[in-house]
Image (tube, rainbow, N blue to C red):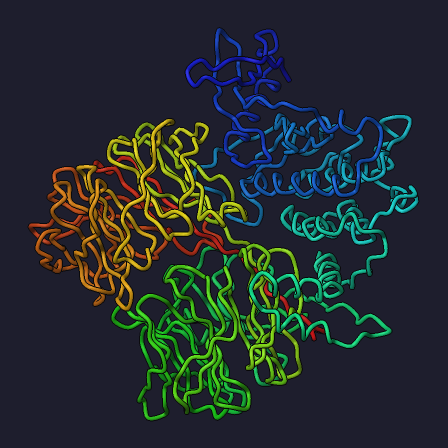
């Protein structure tokens, strides 16, 4: 494909690799097309396990590609004809699967995976090289084609054999058109070689090798006298299925299963075999079996870390069994790409109702059953299921359900008979609800006048507030099956899924009783079938959710562990469980002045935009992916909108870039302090005075003069307000009333702030004097983004609507007009654009897109 040189980028002072297609070969149109395709394909990708592309061009007739320079060796050199340690092989396979998943999500298939194209850096990072044979699919896997995706056609599609013979998939050997599953087969061949030291289909000639790929199976890995876990061998076999329909259907599924093995790959082959389920779920069960067998250890470790020693003591007293319990069985219920909002068992115990937003569409209500089809409940439009009354066959649904941001969705609470009948609207602004055992009362979470309330709704349409918070929020309220007790999750910070399980008795003192300490992430709650435990999904890092149980007396145990994020939805009367496996990602996109498309500036899986420079050249990104970054509150990066390499600024959560671009203001040390960090090396950082602030609440901006900052915070016993503070010293000063919303914008002269108040109005606040001036024609659905440079107009955007409509609001005429519309290319699982930053001229912008992709499972056998 070309010649590769080591080179020096004198502009940025870094070593790079330059791949050049010599002029003598540029006359070969097919070779030139493949070279251009490599640049096009790889340039669209941004992932730690993929080679980064910096530039592409033509010089004196020679096409060239500038990439990051890697120090290390290829996987072929690392193998040297011998097997790798099992743990190392799993580690490399997992990294390769993650890189492929990122490429496949963009509609790109490699088609030439082999050890020569996998590079292991000196620090152990695996990189996928050479997309020279990459084929740009007509659309990303399972989705409509991105609007910015160019059309590429290769003469080598059907009928031509490409790729290196020993690592080809059966469909490549046949010369058929291939998709992402071909890469999965090739990675399976590489996994086999890493574990055995032998090529899976090696024969004396290319023809014999291709025949073996089509008709033969490689020897069992266990026959190489190595302690290969049976579950790992099943993963490899699943990759090497001849039929694409039987093979792993996505690299993400393969990565998920390899991640399940990453913690047990050094264990001997004594692992319990997995129970087969539908599609590619075998390894989920295997991982769960391992988790069940080590539950005592896990519970004890968690108890030591979180102070729950009582639960650990109880777990240690569990009686030993002579026969290991069979592992739970997982049955996948949904197969479309999108987000499951909520799911519940019907009274018959067989039918399952759930609300989901599939393929970028609004939330709709569906029903299904084990091994049954997905059916749309069309008589209830745009609705989500909240609860089902067991004795009256009545559903509580959320009409017009939409994502509110900050992990919350809501709509209008309505009562709907399951078998058909009259729909009865009950309350507005309801986030979640549950029926009492009598089918007459409801416990609901409502957002009212800047506060979140836990309310008991009575048959006479009266309500009783059981608890209220202006700083935190409530989720997943559930009545106990046979008592009046209500379990729920309380989150002390709006916008954060950190929280704890609490219990309240609506007939008693209404005093909330905490049953657990705070978990870093807690999502999903239901009473056990016996009603003696509260089951919930939570984790201390938010990345590997486990299913936990706690008694009303506070005794805790771990029910099950699986890798990745898990959300509990419901438990049936006979003990079956509805859970969703979730993949959560926040990505940052930006478009500079000279650019014609949005560029992905994300780093890991939880990247958030924190601001854009006034010239549109730099974007501030905070990265909260990975346990290390979460413990620090986030890692701050500055990145140019042209996609150049990111520059590390420091560690902070919410942050903002100063007008001159030389400083960053951000919440540090777990959002307990507010600091000013320099963007240039050698400059000191400064921590600002905190009193009387008790909590910072994740929103911050610089005043235009660069001498003061504005942020959202709360004093003890007070609601959230906006505070102004000088960076050269002095305490913060409140400039708004309580209950202020997350979004605000500062006028160019620094005298006025546009923000949303507790009454859901867009209001102008004077910084000095605290005067309030509601803006006619605007509501809390019109989020302030940025003032124009002259200060006569305000950019506002639609809240939680996709695509996002940006309008200009005339502050004198009180009129608004359309300005632009922003719509991410991939809307599957897209719940919101959580932030949007515009330059004053509106020509450049940066935004964060937040995705949750869910798969719903029915689980049998959990105890």
Q: Position of residue 403 (x, y in %)?
A: 39, 62
**Position of residue 683 in the picture relative to residue 554 (left or right):** left
Q: Position of residue 564 (x, y in %)?
A: 60, 55
Q: Residue at x 75, y 39 (%)?
A: 89
Work out whether 19 lies above or below 385: above
Q: Nearer the viewer, residue 53 or 604?
A: 604
Q: Nearer the viewer, residue 233 or 668?
A: 668
Res. 807 visible in picture:
no
Assign the N terminus to one quadrant of the image: top right
**Position of residue 399 in the picture relative to residue 484 (left or right):** left
- Where residue 543 sits, quadrant-wise, is bottom right
Work out whether 74 lies above or below 185: above
Q: Residue at x 53, y 25 (%)?
A: 39
Q: Nearer the viewer, residue 364 or 523?
A: 523
Work out whether 758 lies above or below 52: below
Q: So how many labels did they put on this image?
A: 0
């Amino acid at each position: 494909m070309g010649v590769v040189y080591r080179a020096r980028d004198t502009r940025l002072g870094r070593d790079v690799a330059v791949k050049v297609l010599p002029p003598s070969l540029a006359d070969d149109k097919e070779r030139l097309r493949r070279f251009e395709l490599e640049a096009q394909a790889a340039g669209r990708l941004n992932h730690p396990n993929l080679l980064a592309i910096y530039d592409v061009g033509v010089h004196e007739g020679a096409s060239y590609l500038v990439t990051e320079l890697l120090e290390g060796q290829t996987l072929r050199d690392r193998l040297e004809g011998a097997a790798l340690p099992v743990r190392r092989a799993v580690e490399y396979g997992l990294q390769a699967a993650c890189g492929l998943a990122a490429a496949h999500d963009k509609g790109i298939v490699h088609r030439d995976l082999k050890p020569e194209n996998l590079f292991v850096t000196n620090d152990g990072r695996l990189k996928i090289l050479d997309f020279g044979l990459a084929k740009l699919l007509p659309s990303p896997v399972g989705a409509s084609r991105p609007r910015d995706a160019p059309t590429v056609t290769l003469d080598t599609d059907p009928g031509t054999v490409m790729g290196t013979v020993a690592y080809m998939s059966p469909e490549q050997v046949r010369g058929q058109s291939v998709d992402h599953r071909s890469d999965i087969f090739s990675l399976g061949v590489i996994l086999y070689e890493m574990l055995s030291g032998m090529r899976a289909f090696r024969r004396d000639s290319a023809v014999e090798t291709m025949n073996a790929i089509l008709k033969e199976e490689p020897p069992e890995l266990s026959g190489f006298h190595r302690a290969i876990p049976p579950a790992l061998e099943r993963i490899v076999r699943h990759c090497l299925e001849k039929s694409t329909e039987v093979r792993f259907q996505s690299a993400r599924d393969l990565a998920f299963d390899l991640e399940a093995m990453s913690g047990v790959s050094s264990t001997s082959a004594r692992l319990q075999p997995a129970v087969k389920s539908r599609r590619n779920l075998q390894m989920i069960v295997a991982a769960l079996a391992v988790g069940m067998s080590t539950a005592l250890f896990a519970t004890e470790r968690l108890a030591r870390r979180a102070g729950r020693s009582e639960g650990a003591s109880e777990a240690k007293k569990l009686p030993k069994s002579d026969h290991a319990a069979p592992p739970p069985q997982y049955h996948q219920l949904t197969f479309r790409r999108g987000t499951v909002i909520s799911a519940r068992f019907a009274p018959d115990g067989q039918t399952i109702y759930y609300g989901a937003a599939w393929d970028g569409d609004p939330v709709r209500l569906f029903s299904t059953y084990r091994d049954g089809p997905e059916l749309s409940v069309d008589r209830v439009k745009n609705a989500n299921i909240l609860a089902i009354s067991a004795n009256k066959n009545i559903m509580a649904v959320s009409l017009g359900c939409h994502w509110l941001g900050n992990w919350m969705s809501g709509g209008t609470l309505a009562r709907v008979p399951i078998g058909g009948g009259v729909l009865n609207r009950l309350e507005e602004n309801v986030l979640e609800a549950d029926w009492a055992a009598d089918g007459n009362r409801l416990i609901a979470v409502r957002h009212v006048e800047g506060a979140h309330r836990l309310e008991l709704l009575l048959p006479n349409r009266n309500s009783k507030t059981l608890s209220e918070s202006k700083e935190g929020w409530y989720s997943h309220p559930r009545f106990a099956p046979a008592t009046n007790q209500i379990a729920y999750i309380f989150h002390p910070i709006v916008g954060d899924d950190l929280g704890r399980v609490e219990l309240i008795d609506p007939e008693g003192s209404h005093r909330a009783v905490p049953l657990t300490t705070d978990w870093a992430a807690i999502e999903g709650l239901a009473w056990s079938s016996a009603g003696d435990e509260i089951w919930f999904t939570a984790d201390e890092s938010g990345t590997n959710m486990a299913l936990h149980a706690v008694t009303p007396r506070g005794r805790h145990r771990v029910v099950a562990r699986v890798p990745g994020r898990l959300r509990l939805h419901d438990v049936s009367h006979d003990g079956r469980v509805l859970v969703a496996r979730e993949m959560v990602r926040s990505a940052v996109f930006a478009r500079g002045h000279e650019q014609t498309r949005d560029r992905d500036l994300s780093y890991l899986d939880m990247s958030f935009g924190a601001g854009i420079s006034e010239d549109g050249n730099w974007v501030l990104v905070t990265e909260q992916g990975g346990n290390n970054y979460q413990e620090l509150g986030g890692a701050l990066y500055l990145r140019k909108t042209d996609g150049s390499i990111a520059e590390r600024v420091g560690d902070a959560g919410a942050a903002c870039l100063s007008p001159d671009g030389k400083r960053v203001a951000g919440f540090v040390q777990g959002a307990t302090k507010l600091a000013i960090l320099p963007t240039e090396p050698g400059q000191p950082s400064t921590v600002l005075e905190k009193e009387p602030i008790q909590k910072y609440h994740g929103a911050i901006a610089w005043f235009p003069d660069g001498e003061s900052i504005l942020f959202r915070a709360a004093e003890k016993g007070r609601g959230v307000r906006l505070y102004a503070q000088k960076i050269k010293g002095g305490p913060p000063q409140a400039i708004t009333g309580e209950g202020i919303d997350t979004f605000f914008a500062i006028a160019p002269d620094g005298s006025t702030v546009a923000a949303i108040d507790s009454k859901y109005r867009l209001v102008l606040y004077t910084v000095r004097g605290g005067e309030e001036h509601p803006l006619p024609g605007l509501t809390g659905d019109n989020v302030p983004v940025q003032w124009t440079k002259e200060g006569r107009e305000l950019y506002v955007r639609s809240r939680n609507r996709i695509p996002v409509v940006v309008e200009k609001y005339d502050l004198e005429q009180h009129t608004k007009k359309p300005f632009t519309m922003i719509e991410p290319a991939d809307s599957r699982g897209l719940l919101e654009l959580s932030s949007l930053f515009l330059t004053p001229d509106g020509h450049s912008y940066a935004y964060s897109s937040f995705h949750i992709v869910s798969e719903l499972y029915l689980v049998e056998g959990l105890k």
